[in-house]
Amino acid sequence: MLKQTVALILLAFLPAIGEAIYYRHKVSWQSPVPPSETVTVDLARSWGDNAIWVDARPDNEFERDHVPGAIRLNEDRWNELLGPFLATWSPEKKIVVYCSTQSCNLAIEVARRLRNEAQIKDVFVLQGGWEEWLKKK
Amino acid sequence: MEKAGLSCTIVLVKTTIIAFTLSILLCVGARAGLTWEQTQIELHPAVGDKEAVGHFKYKNTGDRPVRIKSVRTSCGCTAAQSQKEAIAPGDTGEVTATFKIGDRTGTQVKGVTVETDDRVHSNIALVLKTVIAQPLEIQPVLVYWQTGEEPKAKSISVKAAKDFPVKEINITPVNQNFETKITKMGNGEFKIDIQPRDTARPIAAVFTLQADASPKKFTVGARVANLAPSKATAVQQ
């Protein structure tokens, strides 16, 4: 009986291994973020005035509510919103980008563009996003 | 020794029969459900398109009706809906996913999850991949100097996309604190030199960049900044 069970488990693994090899290049829509590029709410808050909070959510969500003092910068209107952001930016300040858990790739994308296109260092994605900030309000 | 070998063979035969029966049963179960023409679509919208739409076509190849319970997307920038809520056996339909391009660039991969009442495949993951051509590639979009730094010109490189012929680019407005100069490099490439008149105090400027062939506007910034926090920065546009 034990042998049969083991043999069945091994047999069940065969198609799984095959599928894993076949779909190894299948794209994922969840961009992984290295831990060094994220920040917790507590740490970001401890930066005080040395941090610029960037809201990457769509306009309607920003208008409903946002982190006090946060600058709106989303990819829907990137070129229009980049100007006000660049006017506020200062090299010694850390950038904290957030979005909601429903749309959290948005913050990752905005952070990536700030790093790559504007070559700004010290850009962090807020862990847990807007919801986590609300919890710790 | 012979007995052990025989027993082993019997175990193997039994196992094979059980596994074969199980796989047949699973295949029969899998018949009830939606068959998708494709679960991954790649779109290449033209420069200036506001949205990209993917059509995921399905057919109910099972012998029972399938009800679509929900259609969810991985991003607020993508909306998706099913043409039908209940799909009878043999019936066809599609899930339409609309991706809002906005000012996004590069390859955007968004997921659509379709939840059905099908017991075998209750959740189907669809992938909408959109490759957005960037008419102008600008690198970097920000140049800055520290106060007291030598006010040397810094360059921004502008490169037009292959299928986006650009003869001229313009940078506006004229700013009293920064001088700008555009140099044509050929092959749709340009160099913009930005130079502050002086770096004695913090100053900032935001410029708009536009190619002759497109109404799309791009933003670049220039700044002289203190290393210490300063709120007294004058922004001029």
Image (tube, rainbow, N blue to C red):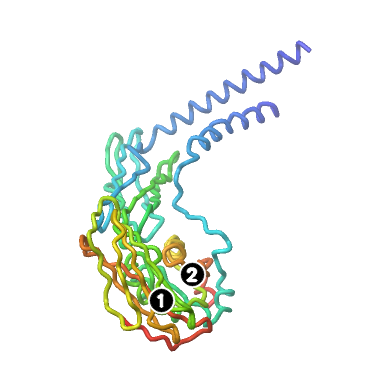
Q: CA distance from mark 1 to mark 2?
A: 17 Å
Q: Amino acid at mark 2?
A: Glu
Q: Amino acid at mark 1?
A: Ile
Q: Quadrant of the C terminus of chain B?
A: bottom left
| Percent of width and height locating residue B88 | 29, 39
Q: Residue at x 47, y 54 (%)?
A: A30
Residue labelled with disc 2: A131
Q: Chain of mark 2?
A: A
**Depth check: B12 or A123 in front?**
A123
The crowd level at tag 2 (other Cα within 10 Å; few <14, some 14-19, many 20+) is: some
- Compared to residue B121, the image places residue B219 above or below, namely below
User: Secondary structure under badge 1?
Assistant: strand
**Depth check: B74 or B25 in front?**
B74
**Depth check: B146 or A52 in front?**
B146
- Compared to residue B220, the image places residue B214 above or below, namely above
Residue labelled with disc 1: A71
- Compared to residue A102, the image places residue B142 above or below, namely below
| Percent of width and height locating residue A75 | 36, 64
Dividing the picture into quadrants, the one containing residue B209 is bottom left
Q: Residue at x 31, y 47 (%)?
A: B43
User: Secondary structure under badge 2?
Assistant: helix
| Percent of width and height locating residue A29 | 44, 52
Contact check, label 1 and label 2, Cβ < 8 Å: no
The crowd level at tag 1 (other Cα within 10 Å; few <14, some 14-19, many 20+) is: many
Which badge, 1 or 2, comes first in the chain's sequence? 1
Q: Residue at x 67, y 20 (%)?
A: B11
Dividing the picture into quadrants, the one containing residue B215 is bottom left
Asked if residue A16 shows in the view, the reply is yes
